[in-house]
């Protein structure tokens, strides 16, 4: 375990992408994938096997959970499609979605529920206590559950026909997205499973750019900023100055972006090497001009899932103004709770909901702000700092720590600032500035790399990998989103 | 089959159809899968050769067994070749240029040469003082120097020890090193490291929590086996090492609070953990200025079993353990940190003003 707070989990490290085990695993899978590519059935069975091995690497017992959710999704989709009566169809949908969510509810929320129920009952003088069991959260359960629900609902809506059993099992277990997304829609992945990929044209430079870039963000940037300022300040805000607290909040914005977008880049790059296209998950989120805009750019596949499978079914903005705000609040609070069973996440979700509701109210009732450059930058600055206030609750181990962080921003101006170094400030501002960098240089680099011979390319990649790993700390912490 | 079309590929459900190509921007060339396999293998080979010394060191840290043996069997010749062709010098130079010490001790944490600077008096007695010798009174000008040392448990404890102690009256150096212990000095020499901490930081109080990884044979820094795990020779040899470790701190003038291993979920580890705790307690009883803090019974449930939850004095239930069944979460570490500081207050007459809320 590398960190003492609740974000640590030593066992998760076993399925980290940046490990020697994964590198060897992927080399074997890559070979098998392309050798079996001409035979779809064998290829699918091989990929399901490989994905289950990948998952079992963390904990072999939970492959039954993955298989169980896949079975529920397929049986549910079949039942929904066969049901002709609309009312019964809706009931079938409700039951199957509830069944698909049941493991997630148990593994993720049982401890939170039982603990809070016990304490609330005690406060009321009642002796009510559900069994207190500490449940181990299976890696990726939130992600594959959401994909399973998307599949059932899409079949119900007629957006997607029932797929074969083998396709559903592969759709939900496909290892590049298995542990932390992106949350791929059935229509984005299942049709790709039936297409024979062209072995003559693998986009190796584009894939390597994503994988090595993602590793750099995770191993170097995220680890450095976390260790240099975020972890020490969040561990004990009272010992740190207001400036350190401010940079810790900004720094955490960089840490979580570098960590999660780094993971997503690696996942998309690995899928690309296998000939698959995954949806984009980040689009320069810290250049957003409002909280609504931020959520269109941050964890985009989760945002659209919440929109399509929660906000719209609740009525979206079609049932009047007040109901719109209520729907936004419900969606964001549940979105917050999705990230973890803790009050800090509930507050973070509610905070984002209030922010988005105010934005929606402004759009309805106030004249639009003139789009001058000054206004635009002011909006970006405000949005970024509003997001950072939310990140304080997201990162803090308790609500008390979050409030202490915010309090230090006002009371900690006389304390010496020891943690801020020129390099740290440069990295934080540099990463934020990259949100506005043009795509041209990256594309040019990929173009140039693509013309190298395989051996030269391998030596260059190996050397870059060495530099990245050497720049990183010993024992890189698990990806933050593995626990969600 | 599907009614929606993916954005980038032809969804025709037929293996006989023309194979799909991933769209690639103009000017960028693609590569055949066979050639990509060569790229992957050359990448891994290059990285392995460049990184062989570090990989070898990581493998040496693994518990004795087949995985370790195979890893070392593969990596030793590669590391030797890397060294013979002077590649290690180049990679060490790159590591140094990138701000890393290629010979750095494993386990993370703060290297001794970057420890906080000395801020207090050094007029401590040169010889082991008496057992009840009180610890000095800290002031804002000369805060109490506290080092929290040990394995991953100490890494967590260090964070919360700092949190529970007054920022003005204490300086805490967090020296928890993950995956280390007192058994394998060939991997991480805690005896040497403790001496470095004493020389550089000169702590007044050392809080130790170590031993989770010590279910291994005892080895010297040179890799010679002192006592095999599971043999009658192991407990006395381990006690000697624990005593040696504690004496380094005490002889340097520090007071030591040794925090015992907590009860863990895996019953298979109970016997050795309890034996280790017995040794820690024995050492605390015989070496001057060492206090022992029990965390086994303290955090055991009713009936003596493992329980991840704890009912506090207000009657509220709190989760105190991580899901790995070994480590504490923040709430648990906070409690252990309070216990450790309270032990120093009770045993060494440390002023209770060192507590942040004291």
Image (tube, grey):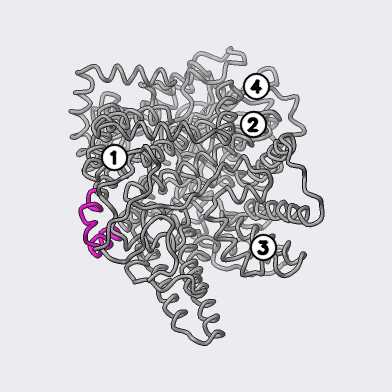
Which of the two labelled residues, at mark 4 and mark 1, occupies the earlier sequence position?
Answer: 1
Residue sitting at the far bottom: A85
Q: Nearer the viewer, mark 1 or mark 3?
A: 3
In magenta, the rendered stretch is: A31-49
Give the structural element (helix, strand or loop) at label 3.
helix
Examine the image and state in which quarter residue A213 appears. top left
Q: Is residue A44 magenta?
A: yes
Write down the residue under mark 3: A330
What is the number of the mark on residue B143?
4
x then y, percent, for residue B239: 36, 33
Residue A387 percent across, percent down from the top left: 66, 44
Callout 4–callout 2 Cβ contact below 8 Å: no
Q: Which residue matches tag 1?
A: B63
Q: Please provide percent x and percent y for residue A315.
A: 66, 69
User: Does A425 appear in magenta?
Assistant: no
**Residue appearing at x 51%, y 49% in the figure:** A281
Q: CA distance from mark 4 to mark 1?
A: 40 Å
Q: Chain of mark 2?
A: A
Mark in the foreground, 2 or 3:
3
Q: Chain of mark 4?
A: B
Residue to which mark 2 is pinned: A247
The dominant secondary structure in magenta is helix
Nearer the observer: mark 2 or 1; the answer is 2
């Amino acid at each position: 375990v590398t960190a003492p707070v609740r974000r640590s989990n030593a066992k998760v490290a076993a399925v980290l992408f940046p490990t020697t085990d994964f590198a060897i695993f992927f080399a074997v899978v890559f070979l098998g994938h392309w050798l079996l590519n001409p035979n779809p059935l064998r290829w699918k069975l091989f990929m399901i096997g490989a994905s289950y091995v990948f998952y079992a690497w963390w904990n072999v017992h939970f492959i039954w959970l993955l298989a169980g959710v896949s079975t529920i999704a397929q049986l549910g989709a079949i039942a929904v499609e066969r049901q002709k009566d609309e009312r019964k169809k809706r009931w079938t949908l409700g039951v199957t979605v509830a069944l698909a969510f049941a493991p997630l509810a148990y593994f993720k929320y049982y401890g939170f529920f039982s603990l809070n129920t016990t304490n609330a009952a005690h406060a009321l003088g009642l002796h009510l206590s559900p069994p207190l069991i500490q449940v181990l959260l299976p890696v990726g359960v939130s992600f594959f559950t959401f994909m399973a629900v998307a599949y059932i609902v899409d079949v119900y809506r007629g957006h997607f026909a029932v797929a074969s059993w083998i396709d559903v099992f592969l759709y939900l277990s496909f290892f590049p997205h298995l542990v932390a997304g992106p949350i791929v829609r059935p229509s984005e992945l299942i049709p790709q499973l039936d297409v024979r990929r062209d072995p003559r044209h693998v986009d190796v430079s584009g894939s390597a750019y994503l994988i090595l870039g993602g590793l750099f963000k995770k191993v170097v940037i995220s680890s450095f900023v976390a260790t240099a300022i975020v972890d020490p300040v969040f561990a004990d805000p009272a010992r740190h100055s207001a400036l350190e607290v401010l940079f810790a909040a900004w720094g955490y914005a960089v840490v979580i972006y570098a960590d999660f977008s780094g993971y997503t880049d690696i996942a998309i790059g690995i899928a690309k090497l296998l000939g698959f296209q995954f949806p984009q998950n980040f689009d320069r989120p810290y250049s957003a001009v409002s909280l609504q805009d931020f959520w269109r750019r941050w964890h985009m596949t989760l945002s659209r899932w919440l929109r399509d499978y929660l906000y719209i079914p609740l009525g979206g903005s079609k049932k009047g103004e007040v109901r719109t705000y209520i729907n936004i609040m419900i969606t964001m609070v549940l979105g917050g709770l999705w990230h973890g069973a803790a009050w800090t996440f509930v507050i973070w979700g509610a905070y984002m909901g209030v922010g988005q509701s105010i934005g929606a109210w402004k759009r309805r009732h106030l004249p639009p702000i003139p789009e001058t450059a000054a206004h635009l930058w002011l909006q970006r600055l405000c949005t970024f700092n509003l997001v950072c206030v939310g990140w304080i609750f997201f990162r803090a181990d308790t609500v008390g720590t979050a409030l202490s962080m915010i309090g230090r921003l006002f009371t900690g101006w006389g304390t010496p600032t020891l943690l801020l170094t020129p390099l740290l400030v440069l990295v934080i501002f540099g990463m934020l500035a990259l949100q506005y960098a043009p795509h041209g240089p990256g594309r040019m680099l990929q173009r140039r790399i693509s013309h190298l011979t395989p051996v030269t390319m391998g030596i260059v990649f190996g050397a870059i990998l060495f530099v990245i790993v050497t720049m990183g700390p010993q024992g890189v912490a698990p990806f933050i989103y593995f626990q969600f | 089959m599907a009614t929606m079309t993916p954005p980038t590929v032809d969804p025709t459900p037929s293996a006989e159809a023309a194979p799909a190509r991933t769209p690639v921007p103009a000017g960028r060339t693609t590569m055949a899968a066979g050639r990509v396999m060569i790229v992957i293998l050359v990448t891994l080979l290059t990285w392995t050769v460049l990184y062989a010394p570090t990989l070898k060191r990581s493998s040496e840290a693994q518990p004795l067994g087949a995985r370790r043996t195979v890893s070392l069997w593969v990596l030793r010749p590669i590391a030797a070749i890397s060294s013979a062709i002077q590649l290690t010098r180049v990679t060490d130079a790159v590591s140094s240029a990138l701000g890393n010490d290629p010979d750095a001790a494993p386990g993370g944490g703060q290297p001794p040469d970057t420890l906080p600077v000395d801020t207090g008096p050094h007029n401590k007695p040169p010889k082991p003082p008496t057992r009840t010798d009180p610890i000095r009174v800290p002031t804002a000008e000369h805060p109490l120097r506290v080092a929290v040392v040990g394995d991953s448990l100490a890494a967590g404890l260090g964070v919360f020890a700092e949190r529970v102690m007054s920022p003005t009256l204490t300086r805490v150096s967090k020296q928890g090193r993950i995956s280390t212990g007192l058994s394998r000095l060939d991997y991480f020499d805690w005896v040497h490291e403790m001496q470095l901490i004493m020389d550089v930081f000169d702590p007044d109080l050392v809080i130790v929590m170590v031993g989770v990884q010590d279910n291994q044979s005892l080895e010297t820094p040179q890799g010679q086996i002192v006592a095999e795990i599971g043999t009658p020779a192991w407990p006395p040899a381990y006690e000697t090492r624990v005593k040696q470790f504690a004496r380094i701190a005490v002889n340097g003038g520090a007071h030591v609070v040794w925090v015992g291993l907590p009860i863990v979920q895996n019953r298979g580890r109970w016997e050795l953990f309890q034996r280790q705790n017995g040794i820690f307690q024995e050492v605390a009883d015989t070496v001057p200025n060492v206090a022992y803090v029990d965390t086994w019974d303290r955090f055991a449930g009713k009936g003596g079993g493992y329980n991840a939850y704890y009912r506090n004095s207000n009657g509220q239930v709190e989760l105190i353990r991580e899901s790995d069944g070994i480590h504490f979460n923040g709430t648990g570490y906070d409690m252990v940190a309070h216990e450790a500081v309270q032990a120093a207050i009770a045993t060494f007459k440390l002023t209770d003003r060192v507590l942040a809320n004291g």
